[in-house]
Image (tube, helix red, strand yellow):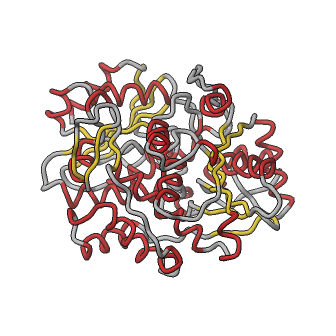
Amino acid sequence: MKLYNIKENDQKVNFEEAVRTGLGRNQGLFFPADLPRFEDIDALLEMDLTTRSTEILSALIGDEIPKARLAEMVTAAFDFEAPVKPVTENISALELFHGPTLAFKDFGGRFMAQCLKQLSDGEKITILTATSGDTGAAVAHAFAGIDNINVVVMYPKGKISHLQEQLFCTLGGNIHTLAVEGTFDDCQAMVKHAFDQAELRKTVGLNSANSINISRLMAQICYYFEAVAQVPKDKRDELVISVPSGNFGNLTAGVLARAMGLPIKRFIAATNANDTVPRYLETGEWSPKATIPTISNAMDVSAPNNWPRIEELVRRNEFSWDDLSSDRATDEETAQMLKAMHAHGYVCEPHGAIAFGALEKSLQEGEHGLFLCTAHPAKFIESVEGILEIKLDLPKALADVAEKENLSDTIPAEFSHVEAKLRSL
């Protein structure tokens, strides 16, 4: 697999180098030089999740990982379902929260862990990642207990839900967590800064498990194919997918799937009050503002990292702005959408609610809508129970950690503290 740095096109790497280094020079994102295109989509969609995903990932990666070994990696990573559930007559939900940390990030985190185990040759690796909620848990659980790999997760203190925090801040061992007195964008900026420090990067074997890492993004492509496989054939050509969007890795994966031949009519980028992308699509001006805390905290991102990859697909004429619309929702509107779904007998959480609301406003006659449910409602138990006036059962994965000791260190949003932690491992 050949990839290039979007910012500095002369930097070209293979899949192994892209996975192991995470970011290119000048904080540039790696991007496939060529995308495979599947002509017989119907045959692909007849396969089961792991068989189909092996075919997709093999076509992307090429011969760098033997196909038989790749099949083993996919089977180990995707050992849970991603069902499509009807919500209204013409809108369905893709539930991506059936993995071990109850969020869509399990797909990318677990596949990346498999890739690094395959490619690392046993040398020391330090994973540095920022999370606005769910990435931290998925990455921490995927890498917990793996020899020669330390994980450092930064998150904005007090700005993620308690149960989200408990899922990854109670593990210990090779998992180290830093509660940053700042925003997710502060955390993300410090991750980028770390990758600009050549000596530090080499000394600690630095890597990132954010969706900037191409292995995570490629894994996410697979669940779009799984979603369409569950949509009736007569509805596929009119399929509109609404994606709750924060750092925009999720939407990027969907656009990549479409560029590879998956029948998706158009996409909706659904955000909360942190609406940099909706404003950009409306005005053509890229103007991130200060991050606003919301009840959909995993989307509290003002400077989404993956957006340059979508722009690159447009530049390469593999995607058109005509096939992307956007919408945003206030907390009050999010609550109304949760209530609207509950009236249909479906319990969701704030991020999925925003995507559902965007679909309801946008869907045209003859179209079929699909929105992504990125996390289990119980991960946001306080807001969901309060808004819907119901009592949620706590899944075992959350019940097991609810009362455990939080092992995080609190630090100011200053890179020197992050560097000290990395050098101490």
Quadrant (top left/top right/bottom left/bottom right) for the C terminus: top left
**Is 79 placed above or below 271 here?**
below
- Give the side of residue 364 with respect to residue 160, left or right: right
Q: Is residue 360 left or right of residue 274?
A: right
Q: Is residue 33 left or right of residue 164?
A: left
Rendered residue at 47%/62% (across/down): 100
Q: Residue at x 83, y 60 (%)?
A: 365
**Residue located 30% across and 19% down the image:** 416
Q: Position of residue 117 (x, y in %)?
A: 23, 59
Location of residue 279 (image quadrant): top right
Q: How many numbered circles are shown?
A: 0
Q: Residue 110 appears in which quarter of the rendering?
A: bottom left
From the top left corner, tell me how far across and down residue 123 is, in percent.
13, 49
Residue 181 is situated, as x and y percent measured from the top left of the image, at: 48, 22
The image shows residue 231, relative to residue 107, as above or below, that is: below
Image quadrant in which the N terminus is located: bottom left
Residue at image x 83%, y 51%? 339
